[in-house]
Amino acid sequence: MCGIVGYVGRYNAKGILMNGLKKLEYRGYDSAGIAIISHRALVIRRCKGKISCLEERVLKEYIEGNVGVGHTRWATHGRPSEGNAHPHSDCASRLVVVHNGIIENYLQLKKRLLAGGHVFKSETDTEVIAHLVEQYLKPMKKKDLLKAVQLSIKQLKGSYAIAVISLDDPHTLVAARHFSPLIVGLGRDEYFVASDIPAILDRTKTVIPVQDNEIVHLTSLGAHFYDHNLRKITRKPMTIDWDPVTAEKGGYKHFMLKEIFEQPMTIQETIRGRFSLESGDLIFDENNLSKTAMKGIRKIYFVACGTAYHAGMVGKYLVEDIAKIPCEVDLASEFRYRKPLLDKETLIIAITQSGETADTLAALREAKRHGARTLAICNVTGSSATRDADGVVYTRTGPEIGVASTKAFTAQLAIICALAIYFAHVRAIITKKRTIELMESLYRLPRLVKKVLALEPAVKAVAQKYFKQRDFLYLGRNVNYPIALEGALKLKEISYIHAEGYAAGEMKHGPIALIDEQMPVVVLATGGVVYDKVLSNIQEIKARGGMVLALATEGDHHIKKIGVDDLIYMPQVAEVLSTITNTVVLQLFAYHVANLRGCDVDQPRNLAKSVVVE
Ligand code: AGP
C-alpha cells in the first residue's frame, strides 16, 4: 500500500504535495518523491526513508510550478531505495508516473518494452507504466496525455491508482484507478488527486471518489471523468465533514477498526498474482531457494512470536494435510534454546509482520548457522528478517498501525495457504489442475471476508452483553484451535480481560473446573471434521452453567437446540479458510469489547508494535 497525490492549480505545487504526502505517511514510508513541471522542465526529487528525509532535501529549494505529483512508498517490488522511489519517468524523462497497487504482468510488459529499446532505471513494476505512456505519446502529432494513458492502462493487469504528468502536455494531470483507492479533490481554481482524503482535507472538503476503471483529466479549469473508453462521465461531488485525525483513520474511530475493514483488500493484494497459472508455481518476492531445494525439503519449522506464532500453528495443520511435509511450530523465544535438529533438508519459515522481532531474528540466524534453508513471511520490505532469509514472501497489507495485529495475521494465513498448495504442487502431491482449483478458492476469500464484516452489528450487540466480564475461555479444534488462541490474545491485549485459548478437547483435562455462570466461553463451531466433538464440548459447558457464545455456519439449526446463549452465523466456507473468516469475527468482538471498556485500542498499555528486544 502506498500513497499518491497530484495537483493542478493556481498555487505552487511543492508545499501542497509535501503536505499531502505527510498526511499519507500512514500508508507507507520507506521512500518518497515528488515531480513538478517547472519552466518546461520536470523537476524530480526522491529520497529513501521517511518523508522527513525528502522534506529536508526540498525544504530550502524553491521549485516553481503548479502541476505536480508525489508518492510515499510501501515497497512491494524492488527494495526501498532512491532508485526505486516514485515518481518513475520514461526514457526521455519527459513524463512521470506515481502508482499505488501491483502490476501483475509487469515482467511481460517490461520484456516487450526492453525489446522495443526502452531503458529501465528501477526494479519496480510501476516503471512499465511510464514507458507505456511514452510509447503512445511520442508518435502523437498533437500530444494527448489522456489518450496515451487510456491506451496504456488497457495493457495493465493487476491493481493501480496512478497519476501521470508530462512536459508534452504540461497543464494536465491524468489519473486512473483499478482496484486501488483514488479520490479527486475540487478546490477553488485548484484540483487534486490522492489515495485518501487526509492528503487534501486542509485544501478542500469537496471530493469525488474515483470508481474502478475510470480515468480523470485535471487541468486548472476543472476535473473531467471518463470511462475506460474515454466516454465522458458525470460525477456528483460529496462534502467530507471529518477532522484531519478522523480522516487519517478513514472515518473509523481507531486504526485497528480501519485495518480490520481493510482485510478484503489486503488479502486480495497479498494473494494477487501469487501463482503462475501456466506453471502453477508460487511467485515468491525474493527467492534464493531453487525448486530442487524446495522439492528436497523434508521438514518444516514455523518459528514466530505472538499472533504470528498462531499463524505458524495453522501452517502446521495445512502443510501436513495438503503437502504431507512433517512440520513443527516453535515459539521463536524457545526455538534456539532447545537445540532443534536442523540440516539442509529443513526449512525454517519465520513469520513476522515487522521483520524486526528480536526473538524471531535470533531463531532465523540460529537456523542458518545449522545450515537450514530459511524463508520469511513478512510485511516490511527490506526489514532484517527479509535480509537474513534465503527467500521472502511479503504480506502486502501496507503499514499496520494498530499494535494488535489484524490484517497482517489474515494475510499471513493466506500466504501460508498458498505455500501449502505450492509445496504440494512442487512435490507432485496434487495435480496442476488441483493446484489452480485450490488457488482459485483463495482468490474468492476477499469476497467472503467482506460478507463476514457485514456481521459487525451482530458482533457489537454481543460485545455489549459481555464487555464487563472478567474472564473468558476461547475453544477451538483442529485448524481452529490456533484461532481460539488468537481470539483470546486479541481480547486480552486490547481489553485487558483475562482470556485463555484452549483446544476444546482439553476442557475435560482441567479448564472445565473454571466453568460457572461467570465464565463466558467463545466456541468456534463452524463445522469441519470435529464438529460433533465441539457440540459435545458445548453441552459439557452448558451442563455446568457456563455461558456459550458460538460461531456457527449459517443453516446450522442443530447448534441452536443445545442451548447456546449467543450465536453468530458465519458464511459457509471450507474449514481451512474458516481460520480467516472466524478470525475476523473474533477481531471485531475484541475490538468492540475493548472500545466499550474505554481502552486505548490502538496503543494498549505495556505493548509495542515490534518487540526488538529479547
Ligand atoms: C499481535 O497482536 C501482538 N501485538 C504481538 O503478539 C505480535 O504478533 C508479535 O510481537 C510478533 O510481532 P511480528 O509479527 O512483528 O514479529
Image: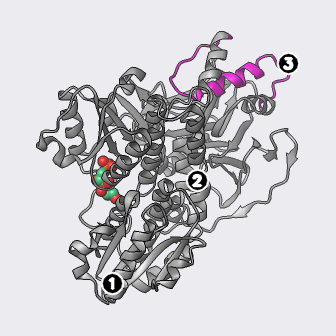
| Amino acid marked by disc 2 | Pro
Tell me the CA gap for discs 1 and 2: 33 Å
Percent of width and height locating residue 383: 34, 37
Q: Circle 2 is placed at which residue position?
A: 446
Q: Position of residue 423 (x, y in %)?
A: 43, 34
Write the start and end of the magenta stretch as one range.
116-145
Residue at disc 2, secondary structure: helix
First in sequence, mark 3 or 1: give its number: 3
Q: Secondary structure at mark 3?
A: loop
- Dot 3 amino acid type: Lys
Relative to 490, residue 229 above or below: above
3D distance between C-alphas at marks 3 and 2: 45 Å
| Horizontal and vertical percent position of residue 148 | 77, 28
Say which residue appears at 57% left-offset and 17% top-offset.
120
Mark 3 and mark 1 in contact? Answer it, CB < 8 Å: no
Indicate yes or no whether the magenta region holds residue 143. Answer: yes
